[in-house]
Image (cartoon, rainbow, N blue to C red):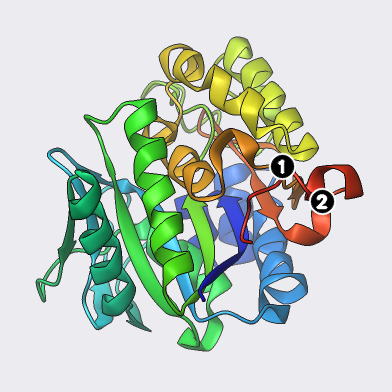
Amino acid sequence: MGEIVAAVFTTHVPRLMITDPQARRAYMGKNVTTFYDAMEQVERERLSRLDFETYALIDTHWFTTLEYVLNANERLKGVYTSDEIPQMIHELPYDYPGDAELAAAVETLAHERGVRVSAAAYPHLPVHYPTLNVMHYFNPGARRRVLSLSVCQTASVQNDLAFGELLGEAIRAGERRVVLVAAGGLSHRFWDYDRVLQRASASPEDISALGNRIYDEKIMEWFCAGEHNQVLDAAADYRAKCSPEGRFSHYLVMAGAMGGRQWRWRGEQFGRYEAAIGTGQAIFFFGPQRQSADSAAASVGAS
């Protein structure tokens, strides 16, 4: 039987790909992001120790409209330059084994359940930088398969949870051991053109609105406590007030796959809560070792 062995909610910000320390300081000033070390620490201290084959990654830059789409190519290979911010991410070669088998299993189950999902295996299907930046850190040597999934921009909170639920069911019905990755941020309002470069530090003081920062902090409190039911109860309100990245679908799909309101795994934060040109960013690892004895029986998780 397949299993979800861990889940990660993680930033994918372009600054992750600034490799030169001097260039990092030139862009962010004195308050440089902690995420360079934090991403490597998650891989080294958590992910590398797990027995699994596939990363199933919900990519918040892959917006679809009619349905959820999965990259079902046998291999994700190419050279990437960001059209959004090419000076930070350019001529980046990538080559990862895909997971066409898992993609097909998810599509088949979705059709049985009446959820619109497409497993797309077109050779030139784009791969976006949330997938590539995160895999650069989490998948050294391209040892694991990568299944990249879209977020559907017309979907409701309940649609996302339903898609996540069948994703989790398809994984558990198969043979893959999987780590889920929700690749995106928290609140997502940028500074305007005239101020964006002056507010590019990683300091939470550079979050674009105090209300967004306060809401992000509440969401992160619930992550740490494993109170995913609270996050889900607030999700529609959070969407409306803080414009979370990807409409918060990356988290919602992940939570649906982990049992929805019954999910109790506590989040372990790596790095700080940070700003990125106004947006809220963080990294949380969720694993069964974070469960308390009291919550273990209630958790659906990856059992």
Q: What amino acid is labelled 2 in the image?
A: Gln
Tell me what residue is drawn at x 65 percent, y 23 percent.
230
User: Of 67 and 92, which appears nearest the observer?
Assistant: 67
Which residue is denoted by mark 1 in the rendering? 264
- Position of 98 with respect to 302 (left or right) is left
Q: Quadrant of residue 108?
A: bottom left
- Position of 67 with respect to 27 (left or right) is left
- Position of 249 with respect to 105 (left or right) is right
Classify 10 Å Cα crowding around label 2: few (below 14), some (14-19), many (20 and above): some
Classify 10 Å Cα crowding around label 1: few (below 14), some (14-19), many (20 and above): many
- Position of 198 with respect to 174 (left or right) is right
Q: How many marks?
A: 2
Dot placed on the residue nearer the N-terminal end, 1 or 2? 1
Q: Quadrant of residue 227?
A: top right
Q: Residue 225: x percent and y percent? A: 79, 35
Tell me what residue is drawn at x 68 percent, y 78 percent.
50
Mark drawn on residue 291:
2
Quarter that holds the C terminus: bottom right
Tell me what residue is drawn at x 33 percent, y 77 percent.
99
Above-or-below relation of 181 to 71:
above
- Residue 88 can be seen, yes or no: no
User: Of 16 and 139, which appears nearest the observer?
Assistant: 139
Discs 1, 2 touching: Cβ within 8 Å: yes
Q: Residue 65: x percent and y percent? A: 15, 38
Q: Secondary structure at mark 1?
A: loop
